[in-house]
Image (tube, rainbow, N blue to C red):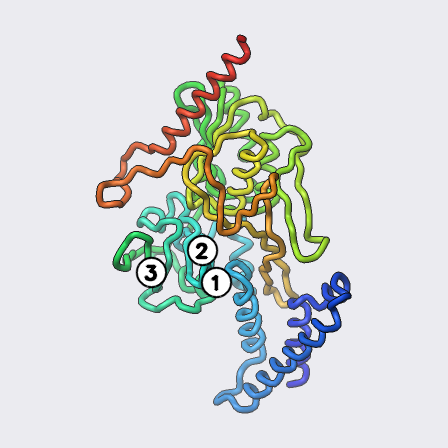
Amino acid sequence: MGNVILKKLVFVFLILCGFAYFNEYDKARGADRDAELYKQIELFSDAVTIVRSDYVENPEPKKLVYGALSGMLSSLDGYSQFMDPDEFKEMQIETKGEFGGLGIEIAIRDNALTVIAPMDGTPAHKAGIKAGDKIVKIDGELTQDITLTGAVKKLRGKPKTKVVLSIFRKGEKDLLDFTIVRSIIKLESIKTAKMLDGELGYVKLIEFQEKTPSDLEKALLELKQKGMKGLILDVRNNPGGLLDTAYEVSNKFLPEGKVIVSLEGRVPKQNKIYKSHGKTNFTDFPLVVLVNEGSASASEIVAGAMQDNKRGTIVGTTTFGKGSVQTVVPLDDGSAVRLTTAAYHTPSGRVISNKGIIPDVEIKPEEKPDGTEPETPVKDNQLQAAIDVLKQKVADKIKGKHT
């Protein structure tokens, strides 16, 4: 039995460490790397043998395997992770728009558990959690060295139960404590689609889900029927989602043949350039994309594509800077590996990781004298700036037609 377990562990490690890639794509240095890999696996096997023979209790084989996989994936970057069967099922549910928890997207950044964005209208958003917040404690327990999987387990729970987050926020001297009541998070990809000032369309896109392209298509057609002459696409606090969805959303605003995003991985099959197919009815009006520090991943793909192709003006504050693509690979027992397989670049070749998209028109949100956000209701100065920019673009287009 022990030999079977060790063989399974070695097999999984060979796969995830890229043994096949070494042989196929890196033959020049493959022998040296293979030797080093076998050496490290031998070290791992020795450690497993010691644990199984000398640990105070007889550990379950699955616990050893899952623990090893979780540690290995979390050591790679802040986005790769191992998901046990229950976590994988929950992730699949989440991408379809419903899950239980607080309503925040998280990652490990600079070895700290970091909020990518609070999702609009969720308990975390209502409590005042902000993009960039560092979660130092969860229910009084330090998050130092916590894995992404471990953090998700602690943050999610039954509706109406409480969790206390101790937050380090840039500009604050002391930790901030937030008591948040969990709830079922139900997210529609589009929160709002309406007309502003009679001729400007406004769409608030809160996540990139499977149904987002069709939802957006429907909303844009309805706005065009109402006389829309320009559009504000608001992706503030949109943490991203599916790559294919970001591609399809960008497609709606670009003529055929424009680069939307390019992917670069370690092996050739991961490299890809996404170009617009031109099957759209939404290229003929001015566009403004509204962003902030909570706009990440797929949101940044859309913003970067519009900016580099000179299709839209970006208004707001610099985005989060999550410029990598994660691929989910299911495993035989119902678990899965979520692995960073490529970095993405904007059409002009810009790297987004840890840099973000810098807006064409930078507008910081209105704040009270003590540095905190004003209480609602409040004038949305970023949205107002976007309206002003769009009105000018619409006027310039009309003027161009008459000259």
Look at the picture and state if 291 lies above or below 242.
Answer: above
Identity of the amino acid at label 3?
Answer: Val
Q: Which mark is residue 327?
A: none
Label 1 with label 2: CB-CB less than 8 Å = yes
Query: Residue 228's spot in the image, x, y percent?
Result: 49, 21
Specify few, some or many for label 1: CA neighbours under 10 Å numbering under 14, 14-19, or 20 or more.
Answer: many
SS at badge 3: strand
Between circles 2 and 3, the one closer to the viewer is: 2
Question: In what quadrant of the picture does the C terminus appear?
Answer: top right
Residue 178 location, quadrant = bottom left
Q: Which mark is residue 148?
A: 1
Instruction: Describe residue 259's horizontal placement relative to residue 202 as left or right.
Output: right
Residue 204 shows up from this direction: no
Query: Residue 355's spot in the image, x, y percent?
Result: 49, 48
Point out the tag, 1 or 3, that comes first from the N-terminus.
1
Give the residue at mark 2.
106
Identity of the amino acid at label 2?
Answer: Ile
